[in-house]
Amino acid sequence: MNKHSLTDDNYYQDTKYLSNSTVSEYMECSARAEAKRKGEWKDEGFKLPFAMGHFFESLLNGDSKRVIESAEFKDQLCNANNVTENANAIKCRAMYARCSENDLFMRFNTGLNEQIFTGEIHGVLFRIKVDIVNIANGFFTDTKSSKATLKTCINEDGEIALDYEDFDWKDGKKRPFYEHFDYIMQLAIYQEILRQNFDVLLQPILNVASKVKPFRYQTLFIDKHDERLSDKIELLGEYIEYIESMRAGTIEPTRCEESTCEYCNQTFNPELPIVI
């Protein structure tokens, strides 16, 4: 197993290692990612989903008291008195109440919790923090709380499948929510780093609970040998080259100028008028 000095306290502050979230940030808005790396920007807008995700996972793992009382999450999960749980925490409990009764969901919630591992991909250091690792049974699980509804449908082959979510796709086409959030890239990174640490190819599992009533939940499976996983690692090489060039100052970061980007909205400073 690879040695490292990462802990729960310094994991998210580290800039030595790349991570799935770091790569995603650069591909979404490299200007925001660079400003964040240099300490010039903090992503305040991600506090609530981050807090809810942690609290939901802590309910599954029996560690909810520590999370809800932590200074990092209390403002997002408690009312103004910092004592009673607010609507966000109550929603997480409702999500937990539903999925915790399902044998399939809970079967893949057994193993080592919140484990940190490091490795190298395309010659660059990576870090991962895995929700569940179960070497004995050959799988790892990433737990998600999602705004996806997780509705199902009958596909062309007569099988139960996930319905496509109505997210805001630039090309107007609908896709499964796991493509919208590029969860397969995350699973591919986790699988590769775990392979380097344990010398075994583990089965990726996604345990997903919806934050939308009636709080549906699903356990998603992608075969551990699926070509989509290896394709993502290959694509990651292109992303890494782009990110490393930017960090070295070879190329300039680019603003995404998306209406949902808090960084681009707050640092918007037009120099020329728009012709109408």
Image (cartoon, grey):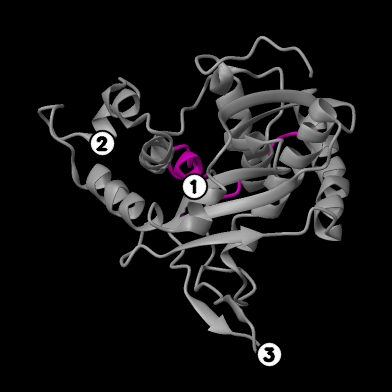
Camera-side residue: 63 or 269?
Answer: 63
Mark 3 or mark 2, whichever is nearer to me: 3
Q: Residues within 10 Å of mark 1 (few under 14, many from 20)?
A: some
> Label 3 belongs to which residue?
156
Query: Where 17 sits versus 167, above or below?
Result: above
Between disc 1 and disc 3, the foreground one is 3
Q: Residues within 10 Å of mark 2 (few under 14, many from 20)?
A: many
**Residue 258 visible, this orientation:** no
What amino acid type should be assigned to the residue bearing mark 1?
Cys
Q: Where is residue 247, by image quadrant?
A: top right
Q: Nearer the viewer, mark 2 or mark 1?
A: 2
For disc 1, the marked residue is 261
The structure residue drawn at horizontal position 35% and vertical position 62%, both measured from the top left corner, is 215
Sequence-wise, the earlier of marks 1 and 3 is 3
Residue 20: % across, % down: 67, 38
Q: Which residue is mark 2?
A: 77
Mark 3 vs mark 2: which is more N-terminal? Answer: 2
Q: Which residues are magenta?
A: 250-270
Label 3 crowd (10 A; few <14 / some 14-19 / many >=20):
few
Instruction: Give the amino acid at mark 3.
Output: Glu
Image label count: 3
Earlier residue among tags 2 and 1: 2
Q: Residue furthest top?
A: 5
Residue 33 drawn at (x, y percent): 61, 33
Whole-angstrom CA distance, mark 1 to mark 3, is 37 Å
Residue at 31 percent of width and 65 percent of height: 213
Q: Position of residue 53 (x, y in %)?
A: 42, 42
